[in-house]
Image (spheres, rainbow, N blue to C red):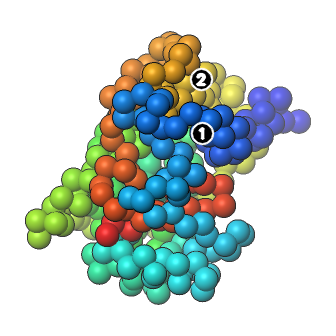
Amino acid sequence: PRSEGAQRCAEMVGPHETSVWTKSIFPFLERTPAANRGPGAYRTWEELRASDDVGVITAVKNKSINFHANLAEVRALAPDLIFSARFQHILKEDLIAVAPLGVLNMHPGALPKYRGLYVDLRAMLQGDVRQTMTLHRISDTGIDTGEVVDTAEVETTPGDSLLGIRLAMGREGVRMMLEEVDRLAAGTCGRVFEHRPTVEEGYYSWPTAADYDDFFASGLRLYHDSDMEAIKLLFAPAGGTGERDDDGAARRMRAVTGVTGVTAVPAVPVVTGATGVTDVTGVA
């Protein structure tokens, strides 16, 4: 029989990053305008939707981004560049061809070793003391097989949670993306090298119940309360959120404040999935 920990992990993966925010925390934050929540406060999806400087559209629910209506929405944005982050759909040729400067993907794992889904969790299970965020191009329907533009390593400690690591990795991914945007604007590009996987290099699918058993039995955590509080501080810097720093997540996230993949570049149209998770960003 599976452990209680495996069941708890299986139930909690995902919701703490999506529905908890879009259904509970964001509506609470929106009672106070972002301008009154403190200097540099991040805006929620609905606040971005209501703004004049960022365009937000919502993809048709339960349909791939390649679905004709969703594809039409992306085409209507006329993006020069598409940026993919935490996106589980495989982009097809018609969508890849929309942006003249191509598609960049932020992948939370070293390639080609960690291709696929929840590879940061896999790295935790294997006891990696460093995790790698990879910025690579998407030029065909291959999964995590495009040319690598840049990489960044994030050191981890035994007390770090999956969400805490993802926050630190996300900061590096956004930094690399913005640096590549600057290079493209200057007519150059980042270092590019092939990493086509061999037969021996596998692909990770969804974690199984046994994987969650191992995760919990190893004393690993999906998130700490301080991870959630640190994220709240980004949206309400002046709010008293009872910040704790027992795992370093809050310290990491203070360094992220002011850097975001949707507001750091002017006039960035954003496509979101039904849950509100960033799916595709076109840089105009």
Q: Amino acid at mark 1?
A: Glu
Crowd band around label 1 with a 10 angstrom C-alpha radius: few (<14), some (14–19), many (20+)? some
Q: Residue 110: horizontal and vertical position, in percent? A: 38, 50
Residue 30 image label:
1
Give the mark nearer the N terminus: 1 vs 2: 1
Per the image, the residue denoted by label 2 is: 224
Alpha carbons under labels 1 and 2: distance apart: 24 Å
Left or right: residue 14 versus residue 256 is right
Which sits in the foreground, 173 or 274? 274
Mark seen at residue 134:
none
Of residues 257 and 17, the one nearer the viewer is: 257
Is label 2 in a helix, a strand or a loop?
A: loop
Closest to the observer, 65 or 232: 232
Instruction: Tell me the mark number nearer the camera, choosing from 1 and 2.
Output: 1
Query: Closest to the observer: 271 or 114?
Result: 271
Residue 144 appears in view: no
